[in-house]
Amino acid sequence: MDSKNAPHPGLYLFEKFEAGVIHLDAQRHVLAMNDYARRILPVDEKQPFDKLVTSFHPERSKPKVNFLLDEAAGCPMANAVPMTMIINIPEQVLLIKVTRITDMAQQLSGFVLVFYDVTEIVSAEEPQPDPASSRRLTRLPVAVDNQVSFLDVNTVCAIESDGHYCRVLTMDGWPFCNLSIGDLQDRLDPEVFVRVHRRYLVNVGAIDRLQRDGAKTSLQFHHHPQFLVPVSRVIASQLKKQLGLG
């Protein structure tokens, strides 16, 4: 096949997934949804019609959904590109895109929210020892050049909390991740990623040096010698054992 005419791998990826579609009014109440959304979301339990769309989401995800809608509502008409976000819920990771709808006078009349269940893309294939626990992530959904990419967790050096979201330190920079540090701590392999500080998760295999400055301990990473991650005193002794230092 001519490489110029070959389908883009990202397009092929999403051809394999059904899309959930939800129609909201301007006040963010649910008006309608397609059959796939009815199957995936707890419609019978939540009875969401004529209720706020956040009725679908756990408390920790509601600020993200509201932020997503705020950003979409504020987009100028000339630049009304769909806003994208990753939502982490028990046993599922959803990629959500939302765009506003305007009437003949270009006034906001509502939103269309489209979601894909990308759990299989970002999660380990093998079953987990505890079936009740969240599935381990093998790839992180990150924002790169206004697109969602899936980053191999083995390429991650450290993860820094940024409010409800995170920045991910890699060899090439700091891509943005829509998941919180708590979400990531729950989903990443604890033998590989250690919460060394309230703001940081680190990949133990990426640590280059452990530094001491009085009572303070910090970590240095391959490819980023100038960047130091602080280690809390409570975690320091445990980390040293994991690194074979005690």
Image (spheres, helix red, strand yellow):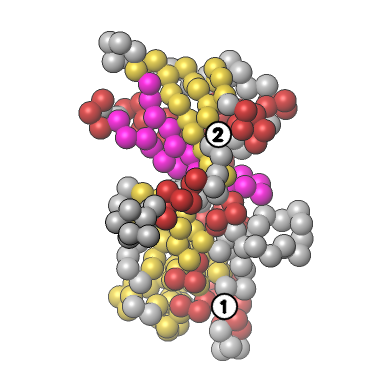
Picture quadrant where residue 245 is located? bottom right
Disc number lying in front (1 or 2): 2
Q: Quadrant of the N terminus?
A: bottom left
Picture quadrant where residue 193 is located? bottom right
Residue designated by label 2? 20
Q: Is residue 243 above or below residue 195?
A: below
Whether residue 237 is visible to the viewer of this picture, yes or no, is: no
CA separation in Å, label 1 and label 2: 43 Å
Camera-side residue of 197 and 7: 7
Q: Amino acid at mark 2?
A: Gly
Camera-side residue of 182 and 245: 182
Picture quadrant where residue 97 is located? top left
Instruction: Please tell me how crowded label 2 is: few (under 14), some (14-19), or many (20+) other residues with Cα within 10 Å.
Output: many
Q: Residue 239's mark?
A: 1
Badge 2 marks a residue whose secondary structure is strand
Whether residue 50 is visible to the viewer of this picture, yes or no, is: yes
Q: Which residue is the extreme one toward the top?
A: 105
Q: Residue at x 52, y 30 (%)?
A: 21
Instruction: Please tell me how crowded label 1 is: few (under 14), some (14-19), or many (20+) other residues with Cα within 10 Å.
Output: some
Residue 65: within the magenta? Answer: no
User: Which region is colored magenta?
Assistant: 80-101
Q: Amino acid at mark 1?
A: Leu
Give percent across and percent down for residue 181.
51, 55
Of callouts 1 and 2, which one flags the residue occurring earlier in the amino acid sequence?
2
Badge 1 marks a residue whose secondary structure is helix
Q: Which residue is the extreme one toward the bottom?
A: 245
Q: Main secondary structure of the magenta part?
A: strand
Q: Residue at x 32, y 68 (%)?
A: 172
Q: Which residue is the extreme one toward the left?
A: 78
